Structures are given as C-alpha cells and as structure tokens.
Image (spheres, grey):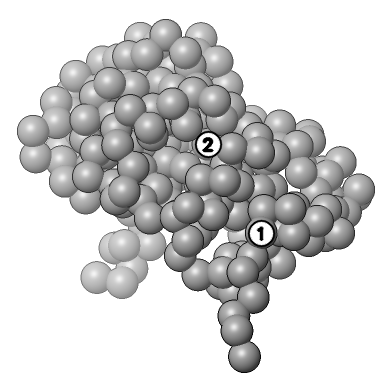
Amino acid sequence: MAETKETVAGLMAELAALEDPKMRAVNEKHGDDHGVNLGKLRAIAKRLKTQQELSVELWDTGDTAARLLALLICRPKVFTAGELDTMLREAPVPKVNDWLVNYVVKKSTHAEELRQAWFFDPDPVVAASGWALTSERVVKKPEGLDLPGLLDIIEAQMKPAPERLQWAMNFALAQIGIENPELRARALEIGERLEVLKDYPTPPNCTSPFAPAWINEIVRRRELVG
C-alpha cells in the first residue's frame, strides 16, 4: 500500500478540528492565539516524524498551531542563523517563541552566535530570547560568561523591563544564584531588593518564580539529596 502524503491543507483542517474555544480563551490570556490541546498536537507530530519541507510550509502559513507543529517536525541543524533570526522576529506569540528557542535554536549550531546577537536587541521579545540562551549557558556551559557582569545588568535593568524580558532576566538571576555558591548572596540580595515577581500567584506545591524563594528552594532540595 502506498504511503499517504500529508498535505498542509489536510493538516490545517485537522488542527482546526481540534480547536477548543474554552482552551483558546485560556491561552489568549497568555498571548497565545490558539485553542489546540498540545498533547494532541504532539501526537500529530509523532505521526509525521521529521519532515523539514513540510515544516517550512506549515511555518509559512503564519497560523500559531501550525507553527507549533512545524517546530516539532523540523530539523534544527538545517536552519541558517539568518533564517532563525527571521523566524524569531516574526513569531512574537509566547508559546511559539518559547518552542522556537528551546526546541530549535538551542539544538542548532548557531545558538551562541544568536545569543550574542539577541542579548542587547532593542526588541524586548528578541532580547528575552537572548537571555533565555544565556540562562542555558549559565547552567550547562558557564565558561567564558561574565556572571558578575550579568548580575550588574540584571540589577540595573530588570525592574523596569517589559514583562517577557523581565521574566527572562529573572530566570537568569535565579540560575546564577542556584549554580554559583560564590554569587548566591549577591543574587539573593538583588532579588530581595528589586522584589520582581515577589507577589506572583503560585499554586500550592509549586516553587515561586520570585528569585530568592526559587534559589533557596532548589538549593535546599539539592542539599537533601546530597
């Protein structure tokens, strides 16, 4: 039996059939304009496996659900730095932006080049992606990073930063404090003084995004396991 070739039109219809108005309403509160259950979307991606050409076609539709699917079936190392930069700048939707950075850019050969290019970008969404890649390096490959210098920038710029950039800088602050005992006291002091996300609603049994609480909790857990 011949294999059935998936088409963009067919996949768009499949995604449209999965649209849930209630889920869309919840997602739109976070800036994500889709109502597709991500578990079901991942199931489609698992069926499709890796298909770079189809991925590009899905991305080009501009539809958020289609772009999320595209990011799950693409080949991250195929993209040039310029293509990834263009994709990031045309994808301000939070979930698309998050998946692009975490599932594609981090796996590409251009992650460090783009980290440096995006870090001081005037667009706060782009800059937030630069900070996300910086946090990745803080944890996995801190050699060569000026960690005290990063704390200087966070101290001076995090409080008034736009929301998504602020979140990304706060994440970096927490990671620096968690991973570097010699800088932990300063990271805690910066977090306590700036009070960014201090009153953020946090469900029971979840760690607060407030950097001092986050740092102390993760350090406590690590000490418990030895």
Dot 1 crowding, Cα within 10 Å, few <14, some 14–19, many 20+: few
The answer to whether any part of residue 62 appears in the image is yes
Left or right of residue 204, residue 128 in this image: left
Instruction: Decide which of tag 1 and tag 2 comes sooner along the chain.
Output: 1
Which quadrant, please, contains the N terminus?
bottom right
**Kind of residue at disc 2:** Asn
Judge depth for marks 1 and 2 and give the one in front: 1
Q: Residue reaching furthest right?
A: 21
Q: Residue at x 53, y 36 (%)?
A: 97
**Kind of residue at disc 1:** Thr
Where in the figure is residue 13, as x and y percent of width and height?
81, 56
On residue 97, which mark appears? 2
Give the structural element (helix, strand or loop) at label 1: loop
Identify the residue under disc 1: 7
Q: Residue at x 29, y 63 (%)?
A: 223
Q: Residue at x 71, y 58 (%)?
A: 11
Q: To which quarter of the image does residue 208 belong?
A: top right
Which quadrant, please, contains the C terminus?
bottom left
Where in the figure is residue 175, as x and y percent of width and height?
32, 41
Where in the figure is residue 76, as x and y percent of width and height?
36, 51
The answer to whether any part of residue 191 appears in the image is no
